[in-house]
Image (spheres, helix red, strand yellow):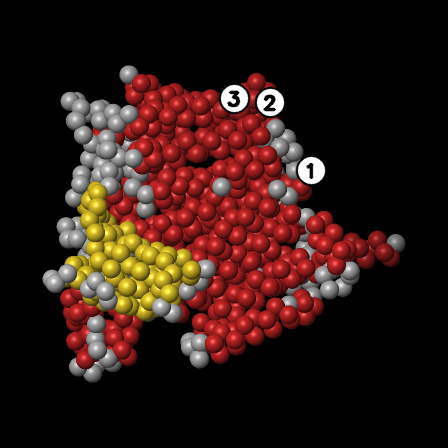
C-alpha cells in the first residue's frame, strides 16, 4: 500500500510540475499576482511530493520488500543497512528518482530563499525548472517506474552489484547530481532572462552563487568518483577518460568557464550574451551526460537499439530542451545589449582567454567522446578514442591556461599592465624553476617534462598566493598592518587564490604520479621481500575470512623501512555469494601524501600468489587539490558581496547547498 | 560508477580477478619491457569498454600483449609493432586514432575552435574600438551638414 502511495505521489508531482510550468508564465503576462506567486508554493509542494516518493522507495529497500521489482533486482536482506540505503540510487530507476529529487530540491531552494529576486524573474525561473521536472517525472513514470510490483514476491533479492557495495556509492552519485542538476538553476535563469529579454549585472550576481554551489558539488563528486575508482578497481588508475567520466567532466569544464564569465558580467556588464549561452550549454552538457549514462548508448550502439525506449525518451528531452533553449537564444540574444569595453590586456581579457581555452577543451572532450558513436552510425567505421588522445589534446590545451592563471587576478579591470604583472610573478616563476631544478638534481635527472610540470605546479601555487599577499602588503608594510589588511580582504579574493592553489596542487599530484610511480608485478611466496618507494614489503601469507554477504582471501604484508617494521597491509579478493562475482579490495597505506598500493592476482601452484605493488608518490595531491578547490568554492560563497545588493538570503541558500557538499 | 560495472561485466565476467600484466609475460630486458608497456597503453582491449590491453585482464588482451612482446623481441620498431597489430585487428585497436580523412573533424576540432574563437575575439575587439567613433556620415548627411554650417 505504502509503495502505491509513493507511486501516486510521483503522479501528483507531475501534475504540480505541469501547473508550475504554465500558470506562473501566464501570470507574468497578465500581471496576475496570484498566478505569479503560485510558482513558489508549487515548487515546494513538488519537492515534498518527490521527497515522499523517494522516502517510500528507501523504506522498501530498508525493509527488504522484495515484492517491489526494483528492490528485488538490487538488494539483499543480508546487506548492511548503509548499502541498503545507498542501493536506492545504485540502479537506473532509483538514480533517476534521485536526479528528480535534487532538481525539486533546487527549485524549492529558489522558491524559499530567492525572496529578493524580482517576482517575475523568479516566477519565470521556477516555471523553467518545472518544465525540466515535468519531463523527467514523465520519463520515470513511463519508462523507469521504480515502484513496479512482482507477484508473487520472491523470498530473497538478487543483491546489489558488489563493486557498488561501498561507501563511495553512498556519497558519489548524490554529490555528482547536486552538481549536475545544480546547473539547472543557471539554465533556468538564462531562459528566464531570454524570455524577459532583459539582462543586467544583477542577473549575474543572482546566478553566481548557484553556479558556485553547483560547481563545488560537482568538483567534490568528480574527485570522489575518481578516488573511488582508484581504490575499488584494483588497477591503481584514477582517471580513465571514460565516456562516463567525460560526461561529468564536461559540465565541470563548462561550469568553470561560466563562473569566470559571470564574474566579468557582474563586475563590468560585459560578455552578457556569452554568459547566457554558457549557462545554457553547461546544463545541456549535464543533460547530455544523463543521456549518455542512462540510455546505454555507450556500452554499444546495438544495446541501445535493442531497447531504445528509455534512450529515445531522454534523447527527446535532450533535443527539446537544448534545441529549444538554443533557438530561444538565437531569437533573443540580439535584444540583449552588450556592456563595458575593455582592452585585450586586462582582467576581462584574461577571463576571456580562460573561457576560450576551457570552451575549446570542453568541445574537444565532447568530440572525442561522441566521435566513435557518430562515425559508426554514419559510416559504419569503428574507431576508438581513448586516454592517449585525450591526454595529448587536453594536455596541450591546458598548458597555456595553467601558465596564464596567476596573471588573471594581477591584471586590472579594463586595462591591465602585463609587464607589471609579470614583474610581480617574478618570485613565483623563480621559485618554480628553482624547485624544478632541485627535483631534477634530487632525482639524478629524470624526464625533463615531468620536472617542468612540477615546477609549473609550484609556480601556480605561489603565483595564486601572490595576489592576496600583495594586496595585504606583505613585505611592504609592517607585519601587523599587513595581517590586518589580509583579514580585511574580500572572501572572494581568498576563493580565487585558493581555487588556483588547488589547481596547482592537483597538477603536482598528476605529474608526480605519472612520472615517478613504480610498479612491480611478482609471484610472491610467504617470506618473500619486495622493495617499493624506499619501503620493503614482506608477504606473510594468506588467510580466509567471511563478511556478511561474501567470502574473502586476504594477503598479509609487513612493511618495513631500513629493517624496522613500519606498518602492515592487508589486501584481499572477495567473492560475493549472491552474484558469484569477484572483486579486489586493494591494500592501501598512506605515507605523507604518497601511497603504497597492493593488489592480489591469481594464486599459483606451490602456495604463492601474483602480487602487484605500486608506489604512488604524492598521489593524494590529486584529490587534495580538489578538496582545496571545494573549500575555495565554499569560501567564495560566503563572500559578503554576494549578499549585499543581491538577495540577502542568497548566501544562506548557498551555504545550505554548500553544507550539503560537505 | 557505470564504467566500473561495465568493465567488470565485460572483462572478468566469469574468471577470478587476474592481473593485466602477469609476471610470466614480463620480458627479461627492462628497456624492451618498458617499450612493450608504452605500446600496450596505446592499444585497445577490443572486448572491453575503453581499456587498454595494458590495463585489461581479458584473454584477448593477454594474447595481444604477448604478440607485442613477440614482435619486439624479433627486433621490430614501435611503429612496426603497432602497424602489425593494426593490420591484423583494424584501426579499432588504436586508442589514439590516426590523423586521416575520417578523423579530420576529431583532430581538427580543437585547432579550428581555438583559431575561430581567437579571430572572433580580435574582430569583436576591433569593431568595439571603432564603434564609439560612430559611423561616418553618408554623402547625403554631409551635404545637409554643409548647408547648415554655411547658412
Q: Earlier in the sequence, mark 1 or mark 3?
A: 3
- Label 2 resides on the chain identified as A
Q: Please give the label number shown on residue A645.
A: 1
Q: Earlier in the sequence, mark 2 or mark 1?
A: 2
Residue of label 2: A31
Can you give x and y, in whole percent of width and height, for residue A334 in the image?
57, 45
Q: Is residue A565 left or right of residue A640?
A: left
- Label 3 resides on the chain identified as A
Please name the residue shown 44% across and 80% down the image: A444
Please name the residue shown 22% across and 36% down the image: A159
Residue furthest to the front: A564
Please name the residue shown 44% across and 71% down the image: A450
The picture quadrant where one finds residue B59 is: bottom left
Q: CA distance from mark 2 to mark 1?
A: 25 Å
Can you give x and y, in whole percent of width and height, for residue A38 in the image?
53, 21
Q: CA distance from mark 2 to mark 3?
A: 18 Å
Q: Please give the label number shown on residue A41.
A: 3
Q: CA distance from mark 1 to mark 3?
A: 25 Å
Amino acid at each position: 500500500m505504502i509503495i502505491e502511495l509513493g507511486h501516486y505521489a510521483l503522479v501528483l508531482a507531475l501534475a504540480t510540475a505541469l501547473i508550475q510550468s504554465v500558470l506562473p508564465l501566464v501570470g507574468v503576462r497578465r500581471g496576475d499576482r496570484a498566478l505569479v506567486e503560485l510558482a513558489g508554493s508549487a515548487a515546494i509542494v513538488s519537492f515534498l511530493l518527490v521527497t515522499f516518493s523517494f522516502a517510500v522507495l528507501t523504506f522498501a529497500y530498508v525493509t527488504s520488500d522484495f515484492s517491489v521489482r526494483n528492490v528485488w533486482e538490487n538488494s539483499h536482506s543480508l546487506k548492511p543497512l548503509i548499502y541498503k540505503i545507498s542501493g536506492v540510487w545504485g540502479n537506473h530507476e532509483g538514480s533517476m528518482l534521485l536526479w528528480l529529487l535534487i532538481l525539486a530540491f533546487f527549485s524549492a531552494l529558489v522558491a524559499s530563499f530567492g525572496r529578493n529576486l524580482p517576482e517575475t524573474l523568479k516566477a519565470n525561473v521556477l516555471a523553467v525548472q518545472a518544465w525540466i521536472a515535468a519531463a523527467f517525472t514523465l520519463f520515470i513514470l513511463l519508462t523507469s517506474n521504480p515502484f513496479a510490483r512482482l507477484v508473487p514476491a520472491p523470498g530473497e533479492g538478487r543483491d546489489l552489484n558488489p563493486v557498488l557495495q561501498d561507501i563511495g556509492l553512498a556519497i558519489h552519485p548524490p554529490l555528482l547530481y547536486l552538481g549536475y542538476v545544480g546547473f539547472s538553476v543557471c539554465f533556468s535563469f538564462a531562459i528566464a532572462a531570454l524570455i524577459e529579454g532583459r539582462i543586467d549585472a544583477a542577473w549575474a550576481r543572482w546566478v553566481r552563487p548557484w553556479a558556485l554551489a553547483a560547481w563545488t558539488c560537482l568538483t567534490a563528486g568528480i574527485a570522489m568518483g575518481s578516488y573511488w575508482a582508484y581504490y575499488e578497481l584494483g588497477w591503481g588508475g584514477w582517471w580513465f577518460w571514460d565516456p562516463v567520466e567525460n560526461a561529468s567532466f564536461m559540465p565541470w569544464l563548462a561550469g568553470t568557464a561560466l563562473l569566470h564569465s559571470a564574474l566579468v558580467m557582474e563586475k563590468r556588464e560585459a560578455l552578457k550574451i556569452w554568459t547566457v549561452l554558457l549557462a545554457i550549454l553547461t546544463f545541456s552538457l549535464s543533460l547530455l551526460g544523463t543521456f549518455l549514462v542512462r540510455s546505454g548508448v555507450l556500452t554499444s550502439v546495438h544495446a541501445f537499439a535493442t531497447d531504445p525506449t528509455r534512450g529515445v525518451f531522454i534523447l527527446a528531452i535532450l533535443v527539446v530542451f537544448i534545441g529549444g533553449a538554443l533557438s530561444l537564444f538565437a531569437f533573443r540574444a540580439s535584444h540583449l545589449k552588450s556592456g563595458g569595453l575593455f582592452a585585450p590586456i586586462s582582467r576581462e581579457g584574461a577571463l576571456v582567454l580562460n573561457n576560450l581555452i576551457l570552451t575549446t577543451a570542453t568541445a574537444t572532450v565532447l568530440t572525442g567522446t561522441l566521435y566513435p558513436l557518430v562515425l559508426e552510425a554514419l559510416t559504419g567505421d569503428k574507431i576508438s578514442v581513448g586516454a592517449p588522445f585525450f591526454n595529448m589534446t587536453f594536455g596541450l590545451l591546458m598548458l597555456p591556461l595553467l601558465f596564464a592563471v596567476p596573471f588573471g587576478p594581477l591584471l586590472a579591470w579594463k586595462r591591465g599592465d602585463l609587464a607589471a604583472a609579470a614583474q610581480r610573478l617574478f618570485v613565483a616563476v623563480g621559485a618554480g624553476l628553482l624547485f624544478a631544478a632541485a627535483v631534477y638534481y634530487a632525482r639524478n635527472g629524470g624526464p625533463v617534462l615531468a620536472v617542468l610540470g612540477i615546477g609549473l605546479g609550484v609556480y601556480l601555487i605561489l603565483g595564486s598566493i601572490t595576489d592576496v599577499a600583495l594586496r595585504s602588503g606583505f613585505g611592504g608594510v609592517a607585519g601587523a598592518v599587513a595581517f590586518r589588511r589580509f583579514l580585511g580582504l574580500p572572501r572572494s579574493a581568498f576563493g580565487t587564490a585558493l581555487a588556483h592553489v588547488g589547481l596547482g596542487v592537483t597538477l603536482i599530484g598528476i605529474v608526480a604520479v605519472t612520472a615517478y610511480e613504480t610498479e612491480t608485478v611478482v609471484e610472491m611466496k610467504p617470506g618473500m621481500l619486495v622493495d617499493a618507494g624506499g619501503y620493503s614489503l614482506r608477504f606473510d601469507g594468506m588467510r580466509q575470512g567471511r563478511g556478511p554477504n561474501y567470502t574473502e582471501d586476504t594477503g598479509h604484508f609487513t612493511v618495513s623501512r631500513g629493517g624496522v617494521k613500519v606498518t602492515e597491509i592487508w589486501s584481499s579478493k572477495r567473492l560475493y555469494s549472491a552474484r558469484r562475482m569477484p572483486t579486489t579490495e586493494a591494500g592501501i597505506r598512506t605515507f605523507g601524501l604518497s601511497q603504497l598500493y597492493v593488489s592480489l592476482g591469481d594464486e599459483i601452484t606451490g602456495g604463492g600468489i601474483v602480487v602487484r605493488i605500486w608506489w604512488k608518490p604524492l598521489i593524494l595531491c590529486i584529490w587534495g587539490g580538489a578538496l582545496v578547490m571545494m573549500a575555495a568554492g565554499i569560501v567564495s560563497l560566503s563572500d559578503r558581496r554576494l549578499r549585499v545588493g543581491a538577495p540577502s538570503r542568497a548566501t544562506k541558500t548557498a551555504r545550505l547547498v554548500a553544507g550539503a557538499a560537505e | 560508477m557505470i564504467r566500473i560495472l561495465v568493465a567488470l561485466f565485460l572483462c572478468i565476467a566469469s574468471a577470478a580477478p587476474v592481473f593485466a600484466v602477469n609476471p610470466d609475460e614480463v620480458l627479461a630486458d627492462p628497456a624492451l619491457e618498458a617499450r612493450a608497456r608504452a605500446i600496450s597503453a596505446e592499444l585497445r582491449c577490443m572486448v572491453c569498454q575503453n581499456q587498454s590491453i595494458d590495463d585489461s585482464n581479458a584473454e584477448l588482451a593477454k594474447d595481444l600483449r604477448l604478440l607485442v612482446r613477440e614482435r619486439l623481441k624479433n627486433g621490430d620498431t614501435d611503429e612496426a609493432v603497432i602497424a602489425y597489430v593494426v593490420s591484423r585487428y583494424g584501426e579499432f585497436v588504436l586508442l589514439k586514432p590516426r590523423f586521416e580523412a575520417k578523423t579530420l573533424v576529431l583532430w581538427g576540432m580543437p585547432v579550428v575552435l581555438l583559431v575561430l574563437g581567437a579571430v572572433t575575439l580580435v574582430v569583436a575587439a576591433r569593431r568595439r574600438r571603432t564603434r564609439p567613433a560612430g559611423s561616418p556620415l553618408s554623402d547625403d548627411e554631409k551635404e545637409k551638414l554643409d548647408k547648415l554650417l554655411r547658412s
